[in-house]
Amino acid sequence: MCRLVGWVSTTPITVAEALGESGLAELTELSRLHADGWGIAWWEGERLRSQTSQQPAHSSPEFTGAVRAVRSDAVLLHLRWATPGITVGAANTHPFLADDRWAFGHNGAVRPAEDLLAFLTQDQRAALNGDTDSERLMHLLLTRTGAHGLDDGLRLTVADVGRDLTPSSLNSLLLGPDELTALCCHYVPPPGTTPAPSLLPEDQPGYFDLCWARLGDAAIVASEPLGQHQWEPIPNGTALVLRRSDAEVRAVEVGTFPPAALAREQSRRELAAAPHPTAPTPGTAHIRVGCDFVFNVPVPVAAVFQVEPQDEPRQRLLAHSLSFLPAAEHTTYQDTFGNRCSRLDVAPGPFSLHYDAIVEVPRALDEADFDAPEDAVQDLPSEVLLYLLPSRFCVSDVLAEEAINRFGGLDPGWHRVQAVVDAVNSHLTFGYGDSSPTYTAADAFAAGKGVCRDFAHLAISFCRALNIPARYVFGYIPDLDLPIDPAEMDFAAWMEVWLGGRWWTFDPRNNAHRSGRIVIGRGRDAVDVAMVTTYGLVDLVHMKVWADVVLPDTGQEGRGPTPRR
């Protein structure tokens, strides 16, 4: 988190002259907290210049000199307080420069920072000097304003970030050849909620305010009132454009973050404040998982959601938060299969769900026993017999002849199940749009394509046809060992098979052992473990899923490698 100061003036002035001696003293004092470096960018005629340091401003001789020596008609000054988990160093010190025409300083955080890369071109990625969300945000902003003009580009940037990411604030200054733009867009508690408890200054009311003032023929913006000027607040959801040629100021309505983005940030703060270990126990990892759903609801409906991970020995639920907008009373219960479900009535209009959790999981790969035998039906526990029968999507009776012809002659046990998984993984091609709500395992087999649930349904059907109990599993797979997959994160489906007196994990979609699986629910097939069930029609407007590794000792999220789903 940071402090910002900037101005345009018809006559060149210094920082000391712009703020006055009392304002400069107050700014310098702020660097005792915002102590991770400082930087200044300014126009010298037609040349954009800059100076940065990793020293705190209050103990930096260069800062003391710059605030009295740099004289310009257009200036951007930044004091840095680094977001936990992001390096303090020259490459990450604001302001950032682009194309010798732009300087950018930011106060806030956009999480996960890695997801901002999806908005950047290859050239922009190659041009990055550091690993901050702020530098990436600058390139997103320049891309949008370059393509759509300043006003619409600002609006699109706010919309892009608010739709998909978890921002605390986009408050920033963008200094260009013709103007200084001050963007004010930041988190406020969602309606019906109270701020998460925190002692951090960044979480206190007013920390993300921006204000501006007139000083003769200069217009000045700052993160907070400094000195003796008559400061006016910049409303949240507004950008001020300060024209360099005559110091004229105009306001642009850019919009605020949507309710889902506010809920994500509120949940992040609640999780950070919740009492849970800050570092994983040896041999484990902490994973932040969750999802957003946004619906249009035309008529009142009853709904059931299954998005909460199980709390069981291989996955400890350390903290979690479930919220609805508008706020709605809900009942949590366990269904027939032991899955956690939330039931509520939804009124007509826009409706969103936000879920966030931190789960501790083993770093080890899925357990395996290549010698595990099949159990005779007469030896199976009574509660397992259900998973030998056909179900809505796992039509083992329809596929029985195919299963017996392909696998009936193989040696029973682990290797026969693996042969089923190999065959399904080879036969089906993965693709979104290649499935439907009524698509059965037989449909997937005939078409040769489907999504992860179809891979699971087909393998389960073959196993049941061979009298091998198999059940459907639904959850998150934040794999800890593979390179990052650039595809959007989604829920995942796999299966558990009963061999040698216990359940074992098999993954027909990925056909590999994975670490970090987090189970939401189990059942006969996807009917029993539907993430959303509504008793009436609704329109799904937006869905986002995440599974991020929580970096040890910092609480900062960093997106883990995404599974191929």
Image: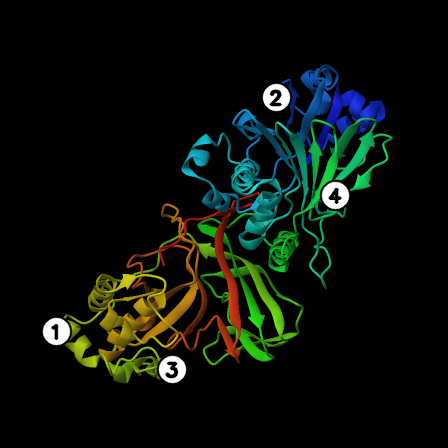
Q: Which labelled disc corresponds to residue 50?
A: 2
Q: In terms of sequence position, does the residue under pointer 2 or pointer 1 come before the other? A: 2
Task: Using the rendered image of the protein, determine whether residue 80 is visible from the camera's viewpoint.
Answer: no
Tally the numbered discs.
4
Q: Quadrant of the C terminus?
A: bottom left
Name the secondary structure under disc 1.
loop
- 94, 369: nearer the viewer: 94
Name the residue tied to disc 4. 209
Is 324 above or below relative to 528? above
Name the secondary structure under disc 2.
strand
Is 314 above or below relative to 212? below
Name the residue tied to disc 1. 409
Could you tell me how far apart the alpha carbons at marks 2 and 3 are, in whole angstroms?
70 Å
Amino acid at circle 4: Asp
Q: Quadrant of the N terminus?
A: top right
Q: In terms of sequence position, does the residue under pointer 4 or pointer 2 come before the other? A: 2
